[in-house]
Structures are given as structure tokens and as C-alpha cells.
């Protein structure tokens, strides 16, 4: 290609997200770099630009093939631009959107010369679908490289060929697992499964991709015998029967996307890829218009927006080292995520060596599990462990920038911790209390620097629960707020800033929900019937089972605080005192509402886990004769309506800053059904007037705890929505 020809091609692509160059080896390089964006995402308007680029490439004399690579430092293609779906007014428009993607990727798949994807960074959704259309895929071994099809998490399916190409590439069962879970693969995992042909160091990624082009289009190895068997006419019916059954058990009919994914993949295998592509695009259009997908996409946009917010008008202080007080379950969990996800040095203090050793062992075990799964090198485990040190005094605390306190829920003790930290750290050190019930302003009352005291409420287990509540009191500085939010982000958490009032937000809306489950039990409803009713509604765990998991003693400790500050509507059923006096603390001591001993006599977390059974002796303890009298939907309504009512109160009182934070807090903090989008989006779906009507009926039937709050009544009268 002459210089004049190159200049002509580059001039035509100047306004494009794609640039094209050809080296002396006659291998064309297409670089994707969306202007003004941190990551590459695919948009519908890019299709024509890409097709033009391919046409221009074909005109190059002697071209051997193409390599597609990203111009972004840490991202290949993060997926399609999800906001495009919001602009679709009909199922047909959404279907057409999928068909555009299919058209583009078909051009890649049918290109007469080899096309190789050189992948570094996130290669997700539409990005992986583009790569699957290429004739080969090479990825970097970098930690930032991830491959996956996460569309199911947005209530969608891969709409640009992913449901058809991936099963043919790696086999049905492996493809179903990836698409139905939306899980992301690391480079070596992707190579083992056959999603990529090779995983290589980043500095030779492009060179290896070019060599693949020079080899020409290679015939792929046949799938393993087991995968061919599952794809056969004999194996398919059994496989899809089992997958359907497992999916229905998991989704309980609330998520339409998984069923459509299974059906579309099966159609492509049994009726051919052309039929599969058609069904895929049509199913994408149908799913894009569902309430479930709209709700899940709203959560995606909300959590993405929170990641870009500091929670304050000021910028955070730099965090170089973190101190933690308390080596128990919470302190150990906080230390773990700070080291593993935050990559920050942690100095943990406990009153004895046992607490420190527990924390060290907890983190070592977590890292060792990843080493065993080949997700982490042993050298990296050693490096991360070196970030965690312990002490029984305050040696080493002069260097910490923020201290997270995770000691017992005792106001006197927490105040003592504030005083000791101020005495043993530098003047700029912040103090964050991990409290679930104690007001932050009371903890800060004795502080010499109250503007540097804040609450950081983590949820157990810390390494799994994604939410953190950041709780400033009236005197907390904006910089302290911003720094606390920044720490939570480094730990991989989603942070919402909430008001300093009893229960904050999450526990305040959770308490009446669990209490009402208790009142249903008092009415004689069987425990498993109550829990199943709420799981059928969409919660991941029933309220009574949740109380066992959290700890009955811990779960009920906040109730007196709420009653004292907010009123009798938070009063719990009296039987909880009887249960606690019987030394029933739940899972942690093996005595609760459920049985925890398996046939070997050990508690099920350490033995073979089986379906939990109710400890029926609790009925005689409470003098209850269990019998199903209420419909599951009625039980769920009683519990959920109280949660909705309290969420609106929290908004009205300024406990949460906006409905978006209220939805994120409920979904990420207590597992409010994601397909409903959160309490406020669910109220919008039902209609505020309908919610008020239900609450008034329940008020007349069960008592004044159901009385609709004033703000909700006003909303109903004006028929406004929380989410415009």
C-alpha cells in the first residue's frame, strides 16, 4: 500500500472510533478507541463505520488478514452501550438493535481472510461477541483481562450471536454455565475452556496475534467427546431438562431471561444457526421490554453512578494505610477486603494475640483457596499477607490514615476507642465506627476532633456483602465523608451516604420486615411457610432463616434502640425474649429456628450441607400449634409493605439522599428482589395510591404499625413517582 493510499484510508476513518494501519508484513491492524471515553463500548452507529473499515481493508493489495485490538490501556470492549435499549420504544426496535450487531459480527465471521482478536482488559458482552466472531482470540495474562457474557444480570441475553457461537466453540454445558451465570473468566480459565486460543504476556500480545494471522485460518480441534455427547440427539434432552429444572429452582419464575437463553441455544443447535440467530434477536427484543430488565438496568446505572461519586463536595484524602480495631468476625472481614481488594497495608489491634491470629488465619485461608483454584499465585499470596500485621498495643498506628473500629456494640467502649485513637495516631487520622445501631454523634461527643469521626456500617459476611453505609453526623467534615467513601470503593464496596439516626437506613427498613415475619409465626404460620413465602416473592433467604444466620441475639439488639427513638411500630413479638433465654442464638451456636446438626453430629457448614429443617421443638417452647392459614402472597405482603412504608419515611426524613440510594441500599444490603429494582421502583410499579390502599387495609386488620406515612399519602394524592 502506497503512502497516498494509507492517507486516504486514514482520512476516511478520521472521525471514526476505528483506525486502520498496515505494516510491512501485510497484516492489517484495526484499533478500537471510542473518543472521550475511559472504556470502549459498542454503539449502533458504529456498525456502518466498522463495515466501511472492512471494505477499505479488502482493497489493500496482498493483505494477509486483520488483527482487532483496543486503543484503551485497560479495556478491550466493556460491552454494548446499555443506554441504547432505553431509547427503544418497542420490541421491534430492540430486535432491530440486536440484528445490527449480528450483521456486523457476521461480516467478521465470514471475512475471507483471518481475523484475530487481541484482547487486553475487559472483554464483556458485545465485546466478547465480537471476539467470538473472529477466527481466533488471543488474550493477555494481565489481571485486568476478563471475558464474559453478563447480559443475564441485566435481564437480557447476548443478542449479537453469543448464544450461537459460544456453544459451538466450547460445548453446550460450558456455554450454558457462562451465559446463565454471567460470570467472568480470567485469562487461564478462558484458555482452558477454549474461549481463547492462547493467553500470553501483554508485551507480546500483538506479536502473537499477528503470527496467528500469518498462519491463516486454522481448522479448530473437535470438541471433547463428552461435549459432543451432550450435543447429540441422545444427550440434549437430558441436559436441557436438568438445566431447565435447576434454573427454575433458582429463579422461582421471577427472571424470564434464563429460560429464553436456554430455549434460544437449544433452537440453534436443533434447527440450525440461522434459526438460532433469528430467535436470539427476537428474544433480545422481548426481554428488553420487560419490567424485570428495566429494573435490573436501573440498578446497573445507579451503581455505576455511585462509583463515580465521592459522596461529598470535597475530594478525599489519600489513604496509604488502614488501622482496624478488633480481630473478630467483622474486624477480620474488613481487614480481609482492605488487603485483598484494596491492596492497602492494614494494622490490626486486638486485646490479645488470639484475635490477631484469627484475622491472619481468615485472610490466609481466603487467599489459599484462591491459590488452590489457580486464581492466585503463591507468591502473590505471600505479598498480600505481608500487608497485614497485628499488635496488642498501638505500635504502628502513627502511620495509619483511617482507623475502622469493629469492637462490641457498647457506647462507652466505642468512645474509649475514639479517645485512644486520637492519642495514638497523627492529627489527620480519621475514626470510622462499624456500628449497626449506635448513633455516630453520640460516639463523637467526647472526640477532640469530631469532624474526623464517621460511621462505616459493613454487612456480614463482609467479603460477600457489597454494600457499605457511610454515616456522617452533623459535625463530620466533607473531606472525612469523601475519604470514607473512597475507602469503601477501594474495598470493592458500593457506598451510600445515610443519615445519623437509629438503624440508619438498611437496618431500619429490615427490622419491621423481620418483626412482621415473627408476628406471622405468633399467628401460627409454620416457619418454613413464612420463609418460603418471602423467597417466592424474590428474597434470597427467608426472614426467619436470616435471623438465624445473622444471630438472633445480634439481630434483635437494635430493636430497643429503634423503639426508644422511633416508636412502638418497631416493637418485636415478645417470644424473642423466650427464645434468647433458651440460649438460641441461631447458626453460630447451632440452636435457633432451624436444625443445624447433620447425621454425623457436626454442624452443616463443616459437614455435608443438606436442606435445612425447622427445629419443631420451638413451637412447644412458644406454645404455638403451627398450621397454614394464610396464603404465601398475603404473608409476603404484610412483611414487604412495612419495608416500603419505612423506606419512604427514611426518604422524607433525609436518612437517604434520594430514591436511587434507597433502592441500591435495599437490594445490595438485604437482598430486596433485584428484578423489582428496589423499594421505590416497586412502589412506582404498584402505584403509590395502591400501596396506601393496601397499608390502610392491613392497618384495619392488624394494627397501627401499618398506618401509611404522611409522605406516602401525599404521593398517592398527587400520584407522583419516585423515579421520573
Image (spheres, rainbow, N blue to C red):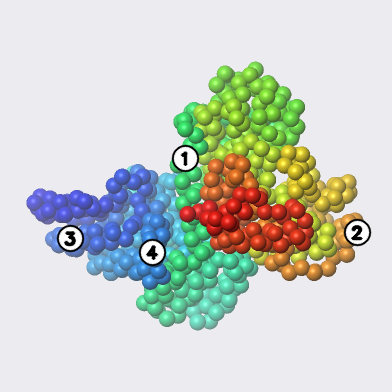
In the picture, the quarter occupied by the N terminus is bottom left
| Residue in front for this viewpoint, 596 or 217 | 596
| Secondary structure at numbered mark 1 | loop
| Residue in front for this viewpoint, 567 or 308 | 567
| Quadrant housing residue 447 | top right
> How far, Cα to Cα, is label 3 from label 1?
42 Å
Q: N-terminal of the two: label 4 or label 1?
A: 4
Mark 2 residue crowding within 10 angstroms, few (<14) / some (14–19) / many (20+): few
Q: Residue 474's spot in the image, x, y percent?
A: 60, 30
> How far, Cα to Cα, is label 4 from label 1?
28 Å
Q: N-terminal of the two: label 2 or label 4?
A: 4
Q: Residue 157's spot in the image, x, y percent?
A: 46, 65
Label 3, on which residue? 56
> How far, Cα to Cα, is label 2 from label 3?
82 Å
Does residue 91 sit above or below 66 in this rendering?
A: below
| Numbered tag placed on residue 88 in the rendering | 4
| Residue in front for this viewpoint, 671 or 346 | 671
Q: N-terminal of the two: label 3 or label 1?
A: 3
Label 2, on which residue? 623
User: Which marked residue is nearer to the observer: mark 3 or mark 1?
Assistant: 1
Mark 3 residue crowding within 10 angstroms, few (<14) / some (14–19) / many (20+): some
Amino acid at each position: 500500500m502506497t503512502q497516498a493510499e494509507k492517507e486516504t484510508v486514514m482520512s476516511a476513518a478520521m472521525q471514526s472510533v476505528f483506525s486502520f494501519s498496515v505494516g510491512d508484513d501485510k497484516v492489517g491492524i484495526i484499533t478500537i478507541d471510542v473518543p472521550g471515553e475511559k472504556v470502549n463500548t459498542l454503539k449502533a452507529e458504529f456498525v456502518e463505520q466498522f463495515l466501511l473499515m472492512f471494505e477499505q481493508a479488502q482493497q489493500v493489495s496482498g493483505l494477509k488478514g486483520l488483527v482487532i485490538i483496543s486503543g484503551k490501556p485497560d479495556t478491550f470492549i466493556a460491552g454494548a452501550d446499555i443506554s441504547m435499549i432505553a431509547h427503544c420504544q418497542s420490541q421491534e426496535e430492540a430486535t432491530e438493535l440486536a440484528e445490527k450487531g449480528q450483521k456486523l459480527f457476521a461480516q467478521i465471521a465470514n471475512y475471507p481472510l483471518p481475523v484475530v482478536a487481541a484482547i487486553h482488559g475487559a472483554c464483556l458482552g458485545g465485546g466478547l461477541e465480537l471476539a467470538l466472531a473472529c477466527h481466533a482470540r488471543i488474550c493477555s495474562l494481565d489481571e485486568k483481562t476478563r471475558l464474559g457474557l453478563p447480559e443475564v444480570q441485566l435481564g437480557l441475553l447476548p443478542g449479537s450471536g453469543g448464544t450461537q457461537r459460544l456453544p459451538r466453540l466450547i460445548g453446550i454445558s460450558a456455554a450454558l454455565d457462562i451465559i446463565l451465570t454471567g460470570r467472568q473468566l480470567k485469562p487461564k480459565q478462558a484458555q482452558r475452556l477454549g474461549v481463547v486460543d492462547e493467553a500470553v504476556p501483554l508485551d507480546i500480545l500483538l506479536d502473537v496475534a499477528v503470527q496467528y494471522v500469518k498462519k491463516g485460518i486454522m481448522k479448530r480441534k473437535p470438541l471433547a467427546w463428552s461435549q459432543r455427547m451432550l450435543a447429540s440427539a441422545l444427550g440434549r434432552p437430558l441436559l436441557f431438562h436438568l438445566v431447565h429444572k435447576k434454573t427454575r429452582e433458582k429463579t422461582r419464575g421471577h427472571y424470564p431471561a434464563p429460560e429464553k437463553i436456554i430455549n434460544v441455544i437449544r433452537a440453534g443447535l436443533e434447527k440450525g444457526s440461522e434459526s438460532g440467530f433469528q430467535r436470539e434477536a427476537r428474544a433480545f427484543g422481548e426481554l428488553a421490554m420487560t419490567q424485570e430488565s428495566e429494573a435490573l438496568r436501573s440498578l446497573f446505572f445507579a451503581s455505576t453512578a455511585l462509583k463515580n461519586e465521592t459522596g461529598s463536595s470535597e475530594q478525599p484524602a489519600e489513604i496509604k494505610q488502614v488501622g482496624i480495631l478488633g480481630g473478630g468476625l467483622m474486624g477480620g472481614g474488613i481487614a480481609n477486603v482492605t488487603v485483598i481488594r484494596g491492596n492497602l497495608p492494614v494494622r490490626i489491634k486486638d486485646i490479645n494475640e488470639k484475635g490477631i491470629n484469627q484475622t491472619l488465619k481468615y485472610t490466609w485461608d481466603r487467599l489459599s483457596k484462591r491459590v488452590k483454584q489457580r486464581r492466585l499465585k503463591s507468591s502473590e499470596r505471600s505479598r498480600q499477607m505481608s500487608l497485614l500485621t497485628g499488635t496488642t498495643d498501638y505500635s504502628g498506628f502513627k502511620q495509619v490514615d483511617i482507623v475502622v473500629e469493629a469492637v462490641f456494640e457498647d457506647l462507652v467502649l466505642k468512645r474509649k476507642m475514639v479517645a485512644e485513637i486520637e492519642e495514638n495516631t497523627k492529627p489527620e487520622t480519621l475514626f470510622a465506627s462499624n456500628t449497626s445501631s449506635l448513633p455516630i454523634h453520640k460516639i463523637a461527643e467526647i472526640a477532640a476532633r469530631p469532624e474526623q469521626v464517621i460511621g462505616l456500617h459493613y454487612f456480614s459476611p463482609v467479603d460477600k456483602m457489597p454494600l457499605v453505609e457511610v454515616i456522617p453526623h452533623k459535625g463530620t467534615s466533607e473531606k472525612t465523608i469523601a475519604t470514607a467513601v473512597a475507602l469503601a470503593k477501594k474495598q470493592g464496596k458500593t457506598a451510600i451516604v445515610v443519615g445519623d439516626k437509629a438503624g440508619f437506613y438498611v437496618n431500619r427498613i429490615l427490622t419491621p420486615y423481620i418483626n412482621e415475619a415473627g408476628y406471622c409465626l405468633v399467628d401460627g404460620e409454620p416457619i418454613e411457610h413464612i420463609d418460603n413465602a418471602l423467597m417466592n416473592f424474590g428474597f434470597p433467604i427467608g426472614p426467619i432463616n436470616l435471623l438465624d444466620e445473622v444471630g438472633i441475639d445480634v439481630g434483635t439488639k437494635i430493636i430497643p434502640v429503634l423503639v426508644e427513638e422511633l416508636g412502638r411500630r418497631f416493637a418485636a413479638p415478645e417470644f424473642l425474649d423466650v427464645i434468647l433465654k433458651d440460649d438460641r442464638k441461631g447458626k453460630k451456636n447451632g440452636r435457633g429456628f432451624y436444625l443445624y446438626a447433620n447425621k454425623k453430629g457436626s454442624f452443616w457448614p463443616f459437614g455435608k450441607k443438606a436442606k435445612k429443617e425447622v427445629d419443631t421443638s420451638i413451637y412447644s417452647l412458644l406454645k404455638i400449634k403451627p398450621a397454614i392459614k394464610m396464603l404465601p402472597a398475603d404473608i409476603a405482603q404484610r412483611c414487604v409493605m412495612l419495608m416500603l412504608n419505612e423506606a419512604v419515611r427514611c426518604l422524607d426524613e433525609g436518612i437517604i439522599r434520594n430514591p436511587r440510594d434507597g433502592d441500591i441500599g435495599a437490594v445490595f444490603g438485604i437482598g430486596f428482589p433485584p428484578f423489582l429494582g428496589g423499594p421505590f421502583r416497586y412502589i412506582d410499579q404498584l402505584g403509590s395510591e395502591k400501596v396506601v390502599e393496601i397499608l390502610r387495609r392491613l392497618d384495619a386488620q392488624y394494627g397501627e404499625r401499618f398506618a401509611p406515612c404522611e409522605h406516602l399519602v401525599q404521593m398517592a394524592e398527587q400520584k407522583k413517582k419516585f423515579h421520573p
